[in-house]
Amino acid sequence: MTRPQRVQIREVGPRDGFQNEPERIPTDDKVRLINALGRAGFTRIEVASFVRPDVIPQLADGVEVLERIEVPDETKLMVLVPNSKGLDNALKVRDKFHEVAIFVSASETHNKKNVNRTVDETMADNDVMAKRIVAEGLDCAAVIATSFGCPFEGKVDLTRVLDLAERFAEAGATEIGFGDTTGMCNPAYASEFFTAALERLPGVEVTAHFHNTRGQGLANAYAALEAGCASFESSFGELGGCPVPAGSTGNIATEDLVSMFHEMGVETGLDLPRVIDAAREAQSVLGRKLTSHSIVAGPIEWASGLR
């Protein structure tokens, strides 16, 4: 597979990142940070989740955030819904976003711990939701968590993951995201996995979502790129994680991913210094040091003739 020369990156920090913070981020700060991401050139941002506020209070202000943010017209906003009740609530403000993400864990144990349902129960609801989302004229994206391994069950069979992906596609999802939810993937398997996924899912946008729990996130992204993947998700400042189990750290840092791609000659359409500025602002808002490398080092500045 020829390496893609241009990729799409969805920024997931405002949802996947903010929901894992121990304290609620003030709405004003969320709006300011998302607006900064819009100015950095993102055409895809995951903004909110329609979950019960008692379960994830950090995202209880999702509707207000959607109503107040000001991003470029070409920026597609995504929301995540866990079930049909969440979709009902999201559709009350249907004009505020463009894409809806639905999800399942490939691991039975992780799915039960995460949403208190079996995989079959979750997928039955997802089949219904996907059709409703498409009928509303919205883009439907599906996410499969623990695609590369489960901390409770160990290895997750590749065929099982792709069978779930195919079912999502048949229900109407035009994008399938594969999540390394607790950072168990490695570059060799990422290459094998995305080669198989791209072959199995023609016409579907295949998206890589890696976590940096064990420091292999960028290497995995590189392997996915070499396998032909041209769609990625990441989080500014390396924010994020997974509440199940403890110790699952954040997504790969968007600014580190963009820096790597740009140095490889792969276009992203993003303004790297502005992405770094947004991550540094998030660091200031949170009042703690974030773990991305580019926040500290900044973009590479090559002296003339030395590259």
Image (cartoon, rainbow, N blue to C red):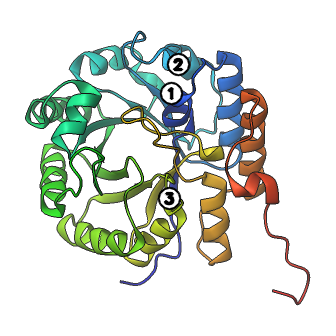
Q: Could you tell me residue 20's position as x and y percent?
A: 51, 30
Is residue 245 at all visible to an observer of this figure? yes
The residue closer to the viewer here, 23 or 16, is 23
Q: Could you tell me residue 73's position as x and y percent?
A: 59, 38
What amino acid is at disc 3? Answer: Gln
Q: Residue at x 30, y 34 (%)?
A: 137
**What's the CA distance linking mark 2 and mark 3?**
27 Å
| Label ID, residue 176 | none
The answer to whether 295 appears left or right of 11 in the picture is right
Asked which secondary structure carries label 3, the reply is: strand
| Label ID, residue 19 | 1
**What's the CA distance linking mark 3 and mark 1?**
23 Å
Q: Mark 2 points at which residue?
A: 58
Query: In the picture, which quadrant includes the C terminus?
Result: bottom right
Contact, CB < 8 Å: mark 2 with mark 3?
no
Q: Residue at x 25, y 44 (%)?
A: 152
Q: Residue at x 70, y 18 (%)?
A: 28
How busy is the neighbourhood of tag 2: few (under 14 within 10 Å), some, or many (20 plus)? Answer: many
Q: Which of marks 2 and 3 is nearer the N terminus?
A: 3
Asked which secondary structure carries label 1, the reply is: helix
How busy is the neighbourhood of tag 1: few (under 14 within 10 Å), some, or many (20 plus)? Answer: many
Contact, CB < 8 Å: mark 1 with mark 2?
yes
Q: Could you tell me residue 290's position as x and y percent?
A: 70, 43
Q: Which of marks 3 and 1 is nearer the N terminus?
A: 3
Tell me the quarter of the picture where residue 130 sits.
top left
Q: Name the residue under label 3.
A: 8
The answer to whether 297 appears left or right of 45 in the picture is right
What amino acid is at disc 2? Answer: Gln
